[in-house]
Amino acid sequence: MDIREKKEKLRIIHQDGGEQENLLEILLDIQFASAEGYIDEETAALVADELHMTETRVYEIVSYYAMLKEKPQAKFVLKVCNSSPCHFSRSEEVVLSLEKKLGVPIGNTTADGLFAYHYIPCVGACDIGPVIKIKDTVFGHLSDEKISSLIDDLRSGKVLV
């Protein structure tokens, strides 16, 4: 980890209070800020040291919560809502469209490391289903054409998330 990256991680640790009881929030914020979208060993050690905890305890939290990742993630992780309302508004068609456009099945990462997609439970956007959530941004009223445009725009940098 370079100096600038370490300073940013330290800033996140201390902005969230630098307290053990904020560990989950700290880890999520660091992961969210990470280009690779995961908590690596060096980062876990830094967090443990700053919060006066063992690395084992930090990794227990990382491995327990599904939203925390221990391995590099795709640059864009597309989360397809599969709650009942989205299911009835064609969330399965969204997955078929993504598979066709990206060339990989659900749960896999594209060869270029840019995209991965998977189902998640309700994102609270039932009125605009079917939806894809990328980080904190929800894209709704999806069709095959809109999905294709979204992928192209993400790939070219026209859409920032």
Image: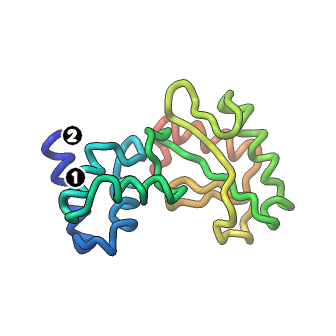
Image spot of residue 115 (x, y percent): 56, 37
Residue shown at 74% from the left, 31% from the top: 100
Q: Above or below — where is 14 with respect to 156? A: below
* Residue name at image x 49 percent, y 47 percent: 159
What's the residue type where badge 2 is placed? Met
Q: Residue at x 69, y 47 (%)?
A: 146
Q: Is 54 in front, or is 99?
A: 54
Q: CA distance from mark 2 to mark 1?
A: 10 Å
Q: Residue 76's spot in the image, x, y percent?
A: 51, 43
* Disc 1 target residue: 46
Specify the quadrant of the image occupied by residue 121. bottom right
Q: Which mark is residue 1?
A: 2
The answer to whether the residues at label 2 and label 1 have Cβ atoms under 8 Å apart is: yes
Label 2 Cα crowd, 10 Å radius (few <14 / some 14-19 / many 20+): few
Say above or below: 94 vs 120.
above
Q: Secondary structure at mark 2?
A: loop
- Residue extending farthest left: 3
Q: Quadrant of residue 26?
A: bottom left
Q: Residue 93 in the image: x percent, y percent?
A: 81, 46
Please tell me whether residue 9 is drawn above or below residue 23 in the rendered image.
above
